[in-house]
Amino acid sequence: MTPTSAPSGAPAAKPSAPRFDLPEPDAFTQAYWDAAAERKLLLRHCGACGRSHHYPREFCPHCWNDTDVRWVEAEGAATLYTWSVVHRNDLPLFGSRTPYVAAVVDLAEGPRMMTEVVDCPEERLRVGMDLEVTFRTEGETVVPVFRPRG
């Protein structure tokens, strides 16, 4: 029997379909996802240059420091930089969520973050609008998204 064949008479196991809608935490990003499960948004902050960044990296993309970069909790405030309302998405699991607002926000700490804006009608979206972080549960994963502040 080859390693990929099933025992005689047993049905072959079907490979699971790839998920495009959920993150795949690794040893480095696990802290980020654990904090999100506690409804906290984490950023990476560089002690050498004093700047924060997102997406999480082990080094600072501003000064390349890799020895003094740590997780810090973000305030959760942001402003809307740009957005697009997605009416059609052919990737599995996204099609049932349309329409949704894919967005880029400027976090109060400085970094830009790709995210989704929720709880806001399309016609109310404005560049510079004040947003706050909220969290959406997707299966066992909690994902930070943003909604209008207040």
Image: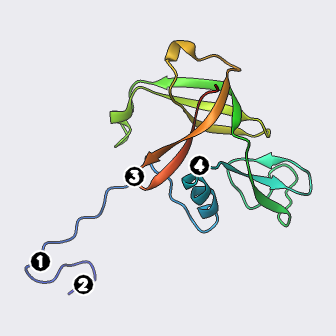
| Residue sitting farthest toward the top | 123
Q: CA distance from mark 1 to mark 4?
A: 44 Å
Numbered disc 2: secondary structure: loop
Q: Which residue is mark 3?
A: 139
> In this figure, which residue is indicated by the disc labeled 4?
39
Q: What residue is disc 1 on? A: 10
Amino acid type for the residue under numbered disc 2: Thr
Q: How far is the residue under mark 2 from the one under mark 4?
A: 47 Å
Looking at the image, which residue is at 85% across and 57% down?
Answer: 64
Badge 1 or badge 4: first in the primary sequence: 1
Label 1: few (<14), some (14–19) or many (≥20) C-alpha neighbours in 10 Å = few
* Cα distance in 3D space between marks 2 and 1: 14 Å
Q: Quadrant of the N terminus?
A: bottom left
Name the N-terminal-most of marks 3 and 2: 2
x 7%, y 79%: residue = 9
- Considering only order in the chain, which callout, 3 or 4, is on the residue closer to the N terminus? 4
When the figure is inspected, residue 103 is found, relative to residue 47, above or below; the finding is above
